[in-house]
Structures are given as C-alpha cells and as structure tokens.
Amino acid sequence: MNEGVEWALHTCVNLCWIPGQSVTAARLAAFYDLPTAYLNKQLQALARAGILMSTTGPRGGFQLARPPEKITLLDVVVAIDGPEDAFRCQEILRSGPGGQARTNYRKTCLISHSMRQAEMTWRKELSSQSIADIVQSVEHSFPKTPEDTRHWFDTIRT
C-alpha cells in the first residue's frame, strides 16, 4: 500500500471538519507539509472515484463528494491503489519439482488460498469502517482536533 493512501485518508477526515468549503491541493498539502503535486495526484484519484469533488477557479479546490458515512476506508484504498489483489499468485509451483502444466495453482495452492482469504478479511474490515467512523473516533480521543483543524484552514494561507 503506498503512502498516498494514508495522505488521502487524512485529507478526507480533515475535509469533514471544514464542510462546504473547497480547499486547494496546496493548502491540503501544507497542512502536513506534503508535496503538493503528489498529493494533488491522490486528490484527483479520489475525485475520479467520486469520493471528492473538484472545482476550478479562484474559489476552487476539493471537498467531499458524498457524506463521510458513505465513504469506506476500502473506497479510499481502491481509489488510490487500484482494485487489484494485493497478493498475486504467480503459480511458481508449476515450475517446481512435480509441477503440472495444466494445474491451476491459483486454486490449488494453499499459500495462494491463505493469502486470498486473508485479503478478503482485510477488505471486509476496511469496507466496514467509514470516514465518519474515523472522525468520530478522533473526536472522542482528541476533542480539540476538529476546532484546531478548522482554525488552521481559516487562518493559514498558502
């Protein structure tokens, strides 16, 4: 999983605390001292996935495209990293001693099976948590964070 997933998740959470405002990629990047061009690439991927909406012009920027309850952690991961499986069986058993050319090792290999099962559990867990769930947890554990975030975006100009 690339670091863009972490950046995208934090950005979505921060946008929850400044609803209705479009925020430029430069300001979102400055919040964590991230490279603007690279974060912008992640923001564009989120916009293509319907997680963010992008507006152009002097008041342009990014904001959530749907309620945070409707954005799962898996939605963000897939938007940034793509829908491909994390583990990709290359069927190396076919090349080993006793390998059979006609055997589908993706189905018969116990390692492939175990990795696929673990990934399904991981995806199920990510799909069961929303951005709203994260926001709620942050607000419970760190109650000043929403106010501090709003204050930063209200006062800092980039």
Image (cartoon, helix red, strand yellow):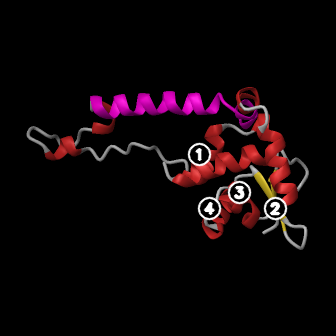
Q: Residue at x 81, y 53 (%)?
A: 152
Closer to us: mark 1 or mark 4?
A: 4
74 versus 140 height, above or below: below
User: Which percent across, then down, holds residue 151?
Assistant: 85, 50
Counting other residues with Cα less than 10 Å from the Cα at mark 3, is it few (<14), some (14-19), or many (20 or more)? Answer: some
Can you identify the residue that label 2 sits on?
A: 156
Circle 2/circle 3 CB separation < 8 Å: no
Q: Are marks 4 and 3 in contact (CB under 8 Å)?
A: yes
Q: Which residue is mark 4?
A: 34
Q: Nearer the viewer, mark 1 or mark 2?
A: 2
- Mark 2–mark 3 distance (CA, rounded to whole Å): 9 Å
Q: Which residue is mark 3?
A: 31
**Residue located at (70% from left, 62% from top):** 30
Give the CA separation, mark 3 to mark 1: 21 Å
- The region drawn magenta spans 110-135
Residue type at numbered disc 3: Phe
Q: Quadrant of the C terminus?
A: bottom right
Q: Position of residue 126 (x, y in %)?
A: 59, 33
Q: Residue 77: which disc?
A: 1
Tag 1 near tag 2, CB within 8 Å: no
**On screen, residue 11 above or below 132:** below
